[in-house]
Image (cartoon, rainbow, N blue to C red):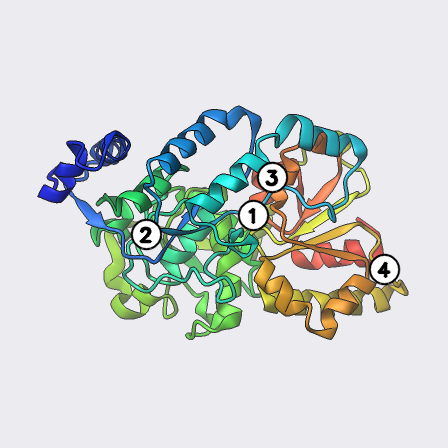
Amino acid sequence: MQLTPEQQALLDGKEGEIMAKIVKTLVMYGEAFGAERMVPVTSKYGHTVISFGLEVMKPVYDLYDKLIAAGLPEGQKFTADPKPLDPKVPSSLLDDLVFKKIMYTQQERYEAQMRKLGITSDDDYTCACYLDQVGNVPKKGDVLSWAESSAVVYANSVLGARCNRNSGMIELMGSIAGFVPEFGLLTDEGRKASWVIEVRCEHKPEAQLLGSAIGMKVMEEVPYVKGLDKWLGTELDDEARTYLKDFGAATASNGAVGLYHIENLTPEAVELGESLIREDAQVYVIDDAELQRVKDSYPVIWKKPDAKPQLCFVGCPHMTLRQLQDWTEAVGDGLRKHGRDKVAVPTVFTAPMPVIREFETTMDAYRLKKYGVVLSYICPLMYMNNPLCKSKAVITSSNKLRTYTSAKYHTEAEILEIITGGEA
């Protein structure tokens, strides 16, 4: 690793022992992946994946205290993943006991630390920090030090920023130091595609299902997707960005994708075209039958596989304003179709606080509440980490939530029919 004189001085202790250890950690991280130098972090905000105060993570919070005591995060702004708890979300007394007395006992301590690290308000807690209402929107070419797989893949792919799939704490250290090791998705070579995905579906593929199929096939490699612009067009408008948000989250969680290219749509694919494809790239053809095969392969790990759904989560990653509006209209149509006034399954829509506030200024918010749907800032995944949830029949349209928890995946159309009609 070739360090600049300024970086070497930090490693040698110019700004104290804690900063020296941060730089040493980043050097070791980079050398493990063959990095030869550091590059400056150019984004205004950092983003941390850690948003929860788990008892088992006390050493992490002890480290936060050391960083704060050393005054290192001063001036750096952050966003963080969603909070794990919200009293509005349905839960039993036993659930609450486990959440507060066993699992998230460090939550108050952690949130106090976050305020000192640069979190300015509850608006900063969301996995979709890149939405306009939140404001952590990197520019094309910006170098980031982020974690949170769904945010990293969106920033790389849709915004054209550059970020590796970092772990929790490593992203914080890169933001504090102001530089990160250059390897992988920070390099031109690392952003080339080793897979060509040919989408040959007769119908617009479900974003979460298509992303799942691609993620499980390519794993951590970079796919170049052809044929999707047939449905998304060639402009990164609100509809296309919303689709790619959910698509990318599934590629990142069902596999380990940190970057994808969509032909004629995403920035680098528009600029560089097929020159992004490696000569030895493999080909994966996806049609409707392949998507059905992938969906049928998902295991159902409920204790009673044929149980009636008890809870539904929509919004992992967090929903956009457009999604809240579209889902509210769809739920209303579904309820009228089935002659119902309220949803048949307790349902939670999750979104960032700024999006929720904007939505609540509209009549749609009144209608959604009337339909019995809970609107929350919560992280569904953190809620589902409660071991008691394994005995619950939870459904979701999120392939990320399905992958990491016991929730059962359904397409959006299936979810809509279940929650408005009551038949699983």
Q: Which residue is mark 3?
A: 382
Q: Which residue is mark 2?
A: 144
Q: Residue at x 78, y 68 (%)?
A: 367
Q: Is residue 14 above or below residue 364?
A: above
Q: Are marks 3 and 1 in contact (CB under 8 Å)?
A: yes
- Counting residues from the start of the chain, the first of labels 3 and 2 encountered is 2
Task: Classify 10 Å Cα crowding around label 3: few (below 14), some (14-19), many (20 and above).
Answer: some
- Counting residues from the start of the chain, the first of labels 2 and 4 encountered is 2
Q: Which residue is mark 4?
A: 342
Q: Can residue 319 be spotted in the picture?
A: no
Q: Quadrant of residue 352?
A: bottom right
Task: Classify 10 Å Cα crowding around label 4: few (below 14), some (14-19), many (20 and above).
Answer: many
Q: Are marks 3 and 4 in contact (CB under 8 Å)?
A: no
Residue 149, given in percent of the width and then of the height, sits at: 44, 46
Check disc 3 and report its element: helix, strand or loop.
helix
Amino acid bearing label 1 = Pro
Residue depth check, mark 2 versus mark 4: number of the one nearer the observer: 2
- Counting residues from the start of the chain, the first of labels 1 and 2 encountered is 1
Residue depth check, mark 3 versus mark 4: number of the one nearer the observer: 3
Task: Classify 10 Å Cα crowding around label 1: few (below 14), some (14-19), many (20 and above).
Answer: many
Q: Residue at x 54, y 58 (%)?
A: 207
Amino acid bearing label 2 = Leu
Check disc 4 and report its element: helix, strand or loop.
loop
Residue 9, given in percent of the width and then of the height, sits at: 13, 37
* Left or right side of 131 for 374: right
